[in-house]
Image (cartoon, rainbow, N blue to C red):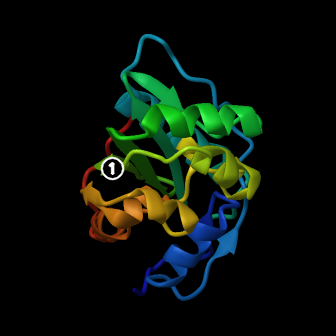
C-alpha cells in the first residue's frame, strides 16, 4: 500500500503490531506513545478502547513532522463486563486465564489513523472461546512469561492458541492490529473522507 504521507509512524512498541503493519506498509517509523491510559467508568468498553487509541495517536502526532501519518491501536479483553488489560504479575495472569477458562469473551481492538487534518477511528470486536483449562495449565502458561505483556494474559499467535478452539471475528484484531479495518481507514484518509472527531 502506497500512502502519500511521510513519515508514517506506528505509535506502538508492540512487536505484533510492527509485524502486521509491515505486511501492508513497506516503510514506517516506530514511536511509542506517552499517553494517558486510564479508563472511564462512564464509558462502554468500546468507547474506552477507542479513546485510548485516539489519545495515543494524538500524543505522537503532536511531536511528529509536518506531513506525517500516525497509526495507533489499543486492545482490551472483556469478560463479564470486566476489562482485562495486561496482567500486573504472574498471579494476576493466572486469575485472568482461570476467568476465561471454558467461556467466550470479547477482544476489542481500536485503531486510530491521524494526519494533520484528519482523524479516523474504529473498533474491531471479536468473540474468542476458550476451552476449559486443565489443572496447572494456567499456572504453567503464566510461568512461561508469554502472557505478561498481553491484554487478557494470552497471545493467540503463541502458545495461548492451544486454549482457543473458536473465534468469531478478526484474527488479526485479536493479535492487536486488524489489518483489513486499518486498510479501510487508510483508504478513507487518502481519499479525503470527512473526518470523525472524538
Residue 86, given in percent of the width and then of the height, sits at 64, 40
Q: Is residue 89 above or below residue 18?
A: above
In this rendering, does residue 116 appear at all? yes
Q: In this figure, which residue is indicated by the disc labeled 1? A: 128
Q: In screen coordinates, is 13 left or right of 83?
A: right
Who's the residue at 47% across and 46% down the image?
133
Viewer-side residue, 107 vs 116: 107
Viewer-side residue, 113 vs 162: 162
- Mark 1 neighbour class, 10 Å CA radius: few under 14, some 14 to 19, many 20 or more: many
Q: Residue furthest top?
A: 42
Residue 25, given in percent of the width and then of the height, sits at 49, 82
> Where is the N terminus found, in terms of image quarters?
bottom left
Q: In screen coordinates, is 155 left or right of 164?
A: right
Viewer-side residue, 61 vs 147: 147
Who's the residue at 27% across and 69% down the image?
191
In this rendering, does residue 68 appear at all? no
Label total for image: 1
Who's the residue at 41% across and 33% down the image?
78
Q: Would you identify the image quadrant in which residue 17 lies?
A: bottom right
Q: Is residue 164 above or below residue 40?
A: below
Q: Is residue 50 above or below residue 7?
A: above
Residue 111, given in percent of the width and then of the height, sits at 43, 53
Helix, strand or loop status at disc 1:
strand
Viewer-side residue, 181 vs 195: 181
Who's the residue at 37% across and 23% down the image?
80
Residue 21, given in percent of the width and then of the height, sits at 51, 75
Amino acid at each position: 500500500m502506497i500512502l502519500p504521507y511521510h513519515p508514517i509512524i506506528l505509535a506502538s512498541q508492540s512487536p505484533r503490531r510492527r509485524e502486521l503493519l509491515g505486511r501492508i506498509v513497506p516503510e514506517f517509523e516506530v514511536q511509542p506513545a506517552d499517553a494517558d491510559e486510564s479508563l472511564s467508568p462512564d464509558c462502554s468498553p468500546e468507547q474506552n478502547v477507542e479513546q485510548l487509541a485516539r489519545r495515543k495517536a494524538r500524543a505522537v502526532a503532536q511531536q511528529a513532522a509536518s506531513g506525517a501519518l500516525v497509526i495507533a491501536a489499543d486492545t482490551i479483553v472483556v469478560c463479564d463486563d470486566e476489562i482485562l488489560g495486561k496482567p500486573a504479575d504472574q498471579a494476576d495472569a493466572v486469575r485472568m486465564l482461570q476467568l476465561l477458562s471454558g467461556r467466550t469473551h470479547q477482544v476489542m481492538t481500536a485503531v486510530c489513523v491521524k494526519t494533520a487534518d484528519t482523524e479516523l477511528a474504529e473498533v474491531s470486536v471479536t468473540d474468542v472461546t476458550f476451552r476449559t483449562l486443565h489443572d496447572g495449565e494456567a499456572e504453567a502458561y503464566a510461568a512461561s512469561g508469554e502472557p505478561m505483556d498481553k491484554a487478557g494474559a494470552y497471545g493467540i499467535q503463541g502458545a495461548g492458541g492451544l486454549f482457543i478452539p473458536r473465534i468469531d471475528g478478526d484474527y488479526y484484531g485479536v493479535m492487536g492490529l486488524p489489518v483489513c479495518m486499518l486498510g479501510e481507514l487508510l483508504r478513507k484518509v487518502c481519499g479525503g473522507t470527512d473526518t470523525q472527531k472524538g
